[in-house]
Structures are given as structure tokens and as C-alpha cells.
């Protein structure tokens, strides 16, 4: 059974809408999609970050990121601004065909939050995380 107890009201409403429109549990639908396209693996890691490094996140641009590959795949997009309205995202998102990572500083702690997802499994996710840390360290230096 799919649940939203920790996900909040909006995801609960989305689950209700999916169930109402399809007559099926969202968990069933997810399993079908995962069988067809594979399961994604996701993580969020809090990484210590000095105040000076946190300030450097505001200076990031796509040109600051010099890596051309992420976990063995060409990088297809580097974002520091939202695609829809051009607003600064307060960090960076790096995308390859089968995975991505995003990093942004915490507003309250001396850490940055690293978000990463792989569409090829846990081993690939670990490669993304390792390389993301290297990319961020280099870009903030």
C-alpha cells in the first residue's frame, strides 16, 4: 500500500486524485512503471560547509562547473537558474541522461544539501554522489 503519512497534504491529495481517476492504488501504478523503466535510486546528504563556501554558492554559474561527464555519461545540462523564469536556484543542478545531482547551501546550518538520483541503481547513484562532491569542492574553491 502506497502511503503519504510523511509526505504532506499535497501528495495525499495527488494520491487520492490518481486513485479516483484510475481506480488503482498509486503503488500498483508505480510498480508497473518501475517494471517498464527501472527503479530510480535517490539520496539527500548533508555535507559540512564553511560559511565562505556557502557564500560561494551564490557565485556559481554553469561555466564554473568544468566537468563534462557525470558517472561516465556526458553532462547534458548545468543549471544555476530556474528554466521557467530565470530566477537563481541558490545552488547548482547537473544533469546526465541517467542521473543528476543538485547542491545548495543550508540557510541555517554550515552544510550544503546534496540531492542525487540515478535511473540505473544504487551503484550508479554512489558514483554520482562521489563525483558530485568532487565537482562541488572544485567549483567552490
Image (cartoon, helix red, strand yellow):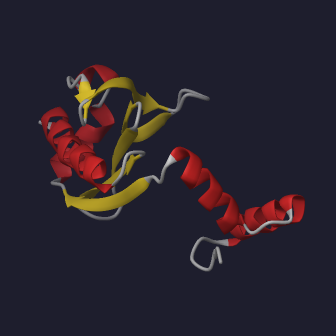
126 lies left or right of 106: left
Residue located at (61% from left, 29% from top): 84
- Dividing the image into 4 quarters, which one contains the N terminus? bottom right
Most foreground residue, 83 or 118:
118
Where does residue 115 sit, x and y in percent of width and height? Answer: 36, 52
6 lies left or right of 121: right
Where does residue 99 sit, x and y in percent of width and height? Answer: 38, 40
User: On the image, which quarter does residue 131 sit in?
Assistant: top left
State whether residue 54 is above or below residue 92.
below
Q: Give the number of callouts.
A: 0
Most foreground residue, 127 or 105:
127
- Dividing the image into 4 quarters, which one contains the C terminus? top left
Where does residue 132 sit, x and y in percent of width and height? Answer: 23, 42
State whether residue 83 is above or below residue 71.
above
21 lies left or right of 97: right
Where does residue 93 sit, x and y in percent of width and height? Answer: 38, 37
Residue located at (38% from left, 40% from top): 100
Identity of the residue furthest to the front in this view = 35
Residue located at (52% from left, 32% from top): 82
State whether residue 52 is above or below residue 49.
above
State whether residue 37 is above or below residue 84.
below
Residue located at (35% from left, 43% from top): 101
Amino acid at each position: 500500500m502506497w502511503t503519504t503519512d510523511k509526505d504532506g497534504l499535497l501528495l495525499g491529495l495527488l494520491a487520492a486524485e490518481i486513485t479516483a481517476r484510475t481506480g488503482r492504488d498509486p503503488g500498483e501504478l508505480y510498480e508497473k512503471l518501475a517494471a517498464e523503466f527501472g527503479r530510480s535510486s535517490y539520496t539527500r546528504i548533508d555535507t559540512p560547509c564553511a560559511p565562505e563556501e556557502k557564500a560561494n554558492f551564490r557565485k556559481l554559474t554553469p561555466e564554473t562547473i568544468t566537468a563534462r561527464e557525470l558517472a561516465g555519461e556526458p553532462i547534458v545540462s548545468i543549471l544555476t537558474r530556474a528554466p521557467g523564469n530565470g530566477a537563481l536556484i541558490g545552488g547548482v543542478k547537473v544533469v546526465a541522461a541517467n542521473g543528476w545531482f543538485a547542491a545548495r547551501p543550508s540557510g541555517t546550518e554550515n552544510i550544503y544539501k546534496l540531492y542525487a538520483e540515478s535511473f540505473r541503481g544504487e551503484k550508479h547513484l554512489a558514483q554520482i554522489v562521489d563525483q558530485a562532491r568532487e565537482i562541488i569542492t572544485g567549483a567552490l574553491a
